[in-house]
Amino acid sequence: MKFRALFTRERLEQAALLLLPPLTSFYLMQFILGVLPWELAPGVVLANSLCIGAVYFLLWSATGYPAVCCLLLHILCGVWGAANYFVALYRGTPVLPWDLTALGTAAAVSGSYSFSPTAPMLAGIALVALLAWLLRHKFREGRFLIDRRTAPLRCLSLVLGVFCLSQAVHTESLSRFGVETDVWDQLGAYQKSGAVAAFLRNTEFMEVEEPEDLSAQRLSWIMDQVELPEETEVSADHPNIVAIMNESWADFEEFGTLSLTESVTDYIRSLDNAIWGHAYTSVFGAGTSASEFEFLTGNSMAFLPSGSIPYQQYILDDSPSLASLLREEGYRTLAFHPGERTSWQRNQAYPRLGFDDFKCGEDMDVEQTLEHGYVSDRSDFAQIIWEFEHKEAGEPLFLFNVTIQNHGSYTVEDYPAQVQLTDEPGKYPMAEQYLTLANETDRAFQMLVDYFSQQEEPAIILMFGDHRPSVEQEFLDKAYGVAQADMTMEQYMDKYRTPFVIWANYPLEAEGPQESSLNFLGQYLLRYAGIETDPYGQFLWSLQNTIPALTFVGYTDARGNAYSHLEDTVYTGKIEDYQRLQYVRLFGGEELTA
């Protein structure tokens, strides 16, 4: 009788309500993320249950309403799983700790994306609804104020909450349970190690690890190895410089696998006195600020945590860049982006990088026309022309422009595709909408070139893409000519290739780089403008002779071979020296001298 009294239905229900929710909510979260329960290792299940349990038990202890806490926990975990799914879908990586500093930017563009629930999400909603129905009679059971009847369970939940919290805050200890991070495959790590525990483990990378041996002697030795470039004659003296980072501008035609109703780069490819090539980026589908950070500073995301946001995390004081260098050369430096002023905290980062002024969409002086809901490149480039029309005569201007026309998503219903695949028209609506936008970029660039070709003041224009767009994976496989699962390292890096074009209204060198990466691209712009770079730039110029492209994803050698950063190669020492100089450049230390 005593045994039966101990295991009454009420007590069993209380025990289940106390112990099971952290486990079942974790399974729900992973299921929505595309992982089945039996695919998860026991240690991973335990680690994530402890992390989730810290929230659940402390919430129960504080409120005294277990059924409400149980339902809320499952809703929160379901939303977390869905959030990671959609973020990974559109940019390639799930939610990372440093993303929390860019919530405003995410909210500003979220309205343009399509969030269609998947089958696991619909099943998850049904399961949560079933849970709510099963708990319907228990929602009122509870008491916010502690009394004799509820005190034992409230105290027990507090003890359990504190214990679970002690495990969660010491993120290194989660590795004992098999929770691992993978900076090269964050989504895979979230699926394998759990979206909560893996997220917490990523907080270990909030700080950039200091490289070994940053002594003055070592830095001096590195700079002594720099091979200075041959001097080049430029017919223009301090030409006006326009650098355009074009949103999601990509060249899918380069692989020769697509047949389009019309080329979307035909004008730019036909330009005389121009250099056409491709540059590797560190991001795919999103992460614009990482690309502009690499271009403006010459630093590489390869030495920073996966998915980090440099403007929010590292550009906290004055930091050298193309803008600060050109300002010292007598240029007026202006940044222009036809979006929101606070996106990626550009309004704070740009002054620290050496820009005199920053204009955003609300500051535009020309009429705004839209393409699929965003300010068109034609309006964007018209603003560039306006700036030159209204600058002081003879004052050289450096204008850095980040466009917005080609921003995702590519599912705007009232924006018909004008460019289609001839063999499969309409099969890839997102890709065709993107290609239509890219075609508008080509036309708008012609307007810009036509204007500057008529100007007496010398001017040079660089336009490059920040990353490839996030469109149908099947289309991407078709464009690349290979499925992602079957890619070689060289083909995988092609995923992160964008075009660039350099044009000037004065003679350029006949030959230019066909391949580069964004961190090196700025040095080419300075060279063709006849502007002397600084010692760090001299190092970059010397390095790119051996390693033409270096990104977070990997790097290439002069023969076109691609390597992962996980490999130990003959180039590893040079890359480590680059990491040392970047750390000093970004976080302070010895001043570099040539």
Image (cartoon, rainbow, N blue to C red):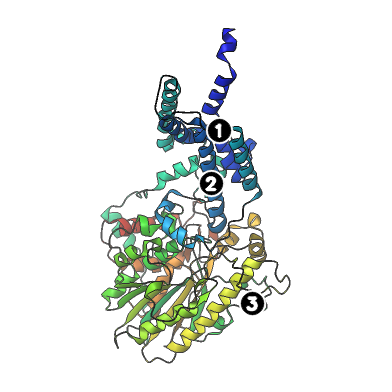
Q: Is residue 87 left or right of residue 509?
A: right
Q: Amino acid at mark 3?
A: Gln
From the image, tell me which residue sits under label 3.
418
Q: CA distance from mark 2 to mark 3?
A: 37 Å
Q: Is residue 137 left or right of residue 314?
A: right
Q: Estimate the x, y position of residue 22 in percent, counting from the top left.
A: 52, 33
Q: Amino acid at mark 2?
A: Val
The numbered mark, 1 or 3, whose residue comes first in the sequence reads: 1
Q: Estimate the x, y position of residue 298 in percent, counting from the top left.
A: 38, 65
How busy is the neighbourhood of tag 3: few (under 14 within 10 Å), some, or many (20 plus)? Answer: some
The numbered mark, 2 or 1, whose residue comes first in the sequence reads: 1
Relative height, residue 436 to residue 111 (above, below)? below
Q: Quadrant of residue 241?
A: bottom left
Relative height, residue 457 to residue 86 (above, below)? below
How busy is the neighbourhood of tag 2: few (under 14 within 10 Å), some, or many (20 plus)? Answer: some
- Which label is found at residue 79? 2
Q: Are marks 1 and 3 in contact (CB under 8 Å)?
A: no
Q: Closest to the observer: 298 or 566?
A: 298
Q: Is residue 418 left or right of residue 146?
A: right
From the image, tell me which residue sits under label 1.
23
Q: Closest to the observer: 241 or 529?
A: 241
